[in-house]
Image (spheres, rainbow, N blue to C red):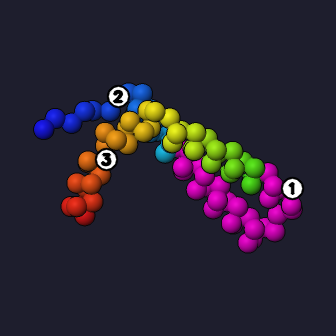
């Protein structure tokens, strides 16, 4: 059984998605930390909230691309096998 290797474009998209996910998680942590320790002003909170919303929209846009969907379809059998082993 041969498995199609991801193209450089698919790998680049995957890297971009992971960077966006990492940034969203970081912003969520920053927002939580700021709300607990620093009691940010409403303006500070709004800026972080807008940035996080923008990043979520970018991530949703990436998830809706054909490349993302094709990559998920190609790699789904591997994910199923990996889950079976774990």
- Image quadrant in which the C terminus is located: bottom left
- 1 vs 3, front mark: 3
Q: Secondary structure at mark 1?
A: helix
Q: Position of residue 54 (x, y in %)?
A: 69, 45
Q: Secondary structure at mark 3?
A: helix
**Label 1 to label 3: alpha-carbon separation:** 43 Å
Q: Secondary structure at mark 2?
A: loop
- 1 vs 2, front mark: 2
- Label 2: few (<14), some (14–19) or many (≥20) C-alpha neighbours in 10 Å: few
**Residue 29 lies in the magenta stretch:** yes
Q: Reading the chain from its start, which is encountered first: label 1 or label 2? A: 2
**Label 1 to label 2: alpha-carbon separation:** 43 Å
Horizontal side, residue 80 vs residue 71: left or right:
left
Question: Which stretch did the figure color magenta?
Answer: 19-47
- 3 vs 2, front mark: 3
Q: Which mark is residue 43?
A: 1
- Label 1: few (<14), some (14–19) or many (≥20) C-alpha neighbours in 10 Å: few
**Residue 37 lies in the magenta stretch:** yes
Q: Which mark is residue 76?
A: 3
**Label 3 to label 2: alpha-carbon separation:** 16 Å
The structure residue drawn at horizontal position 51% and vertical position 42%, both measured from the top left corner, is 63
Q: Reading the chain from its start, which is encountered first: label 3 or label 2? A: 2
Between 18 and 1, the one lying in front of the other is 1
The structure residue drawn at horizontal position 75% and vertical position 50%, both measured from the top left corner, is 50
Q: Quadrant of residue 68?
A: top left
- Circles 1, 3 touching at the beta carbon (< 8 Å): no
Between 29 and 46, the one lying in front of the other is 46
| Residue located beneath label 2 in the image | 7
């Amino acid at each position: 059984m041969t498995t199609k290797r991801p193209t450089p474009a698919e790998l680049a998209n995957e890297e971009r998605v992971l960077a966006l996910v990492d940034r969203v998680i970081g912003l969520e942590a920053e927002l939580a930390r700021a709300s607990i320790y620093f009691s940010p002003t409403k303006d500070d909170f709004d800026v972080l909230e807008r940035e996080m919303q923008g990043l979520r929209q970018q991530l949703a846009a990436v998830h809706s691309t054909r490349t993302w969907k094709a990559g998920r379809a190609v790699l789904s059998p591997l994910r199923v096998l990996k889950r079976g082993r774990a």
